Image (cartoon, helix red, strand yellow):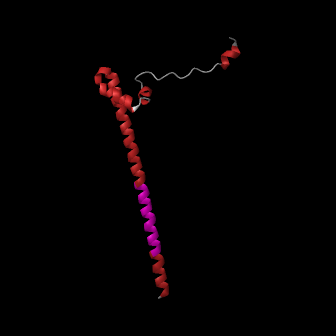
Amino acid sequence: MDVDETTTASPRQDAAPEPYSAEWWQVRTPNELRDIIKRGFGVGQVAYDGAVLETERRAREAMRRVRDQAEQAEHQQTKARFILLGGILALLMVLMIALWLTR
C-alpha cells in the first residue's frame, strides 16, 4: 500500500454506541425499554435503572412538547381575541363618528 492508497481509503465507520451509554439508551425502542423494565433487576441494576431513567426522560420530553403546544394554542387564541376586540372597537369608533357627523 503506498501513500496515495492510504489517503483515499474510506474513513472508519462509526461504531455502535457503547452499551448502557446515553446514546445507547436513546436508540432503544419503547418495546425494548419496556422489556428491560418488566424483567426487573434480573437484567442487572444498571440496565434496569437506565431503562427507567430513559423512560422518564422520554415522558418529560413528551410532557414538555404537550405544554409547549398548549401554550402556543393559548397564545394564538389570545392574539385572535385582541384582533377581534380591536376590530369591534374600530367599528364602534366609525359608527360613533358617522352618528356625530349626521346630527
Point out residue 86 in the picture as x, y percentages from the top left corner. 45, 68
Point out residue 14 in the picture as x, y percentages from the top left corner. 53, 23
Q: Is residue 73 magenta?
A: no
Residue at 68% x, 16% y: name it. 5
Q: Quadrant of residue 13?
A: top right
**Whether residue 12 is situated above or below residue 102 in the rendered picture:** above
Q: How many marks?
A: 0
Lateral position of residue 40 relative to residue 9, left or right:
left
**Whether residue 89 is situated above or below residue 23 in the rendered picture:** below
Magenta range is 74-91
Q: Residue furthest top?
A: 1
Point out residue 60 in the picture as x, y percentages from the top left corner. 36, 39
Lateral position of residue 13 relative to residue 31, left or right:
right
Q: Quadrant of residue 28?
A: top left
The quadrant the N terminus occupies is: top right
Camera-nearest residue between 50 and 40: 40
Dominant SS of magenta comes to helix
Q: Residue furthest left?
A: 41
Lateral position of residue 40 relative to residue 15, left or right:
left
Residue at 29% x, 22% y: name it. 41
Point out residue 22 in the picture as x, y percentages from the top left corner. 42, 27
Q: Is residue 76 magenta?
A: yes
Residue at 34% x, 34% y: name it. 56
**Whether residue 29 is situated above or below residue 65 in the rendered picture:** above
Residue at 29% x, 20% y: name it. 42
Lateral position of residue 81 relative to residue 38, left or right:
right
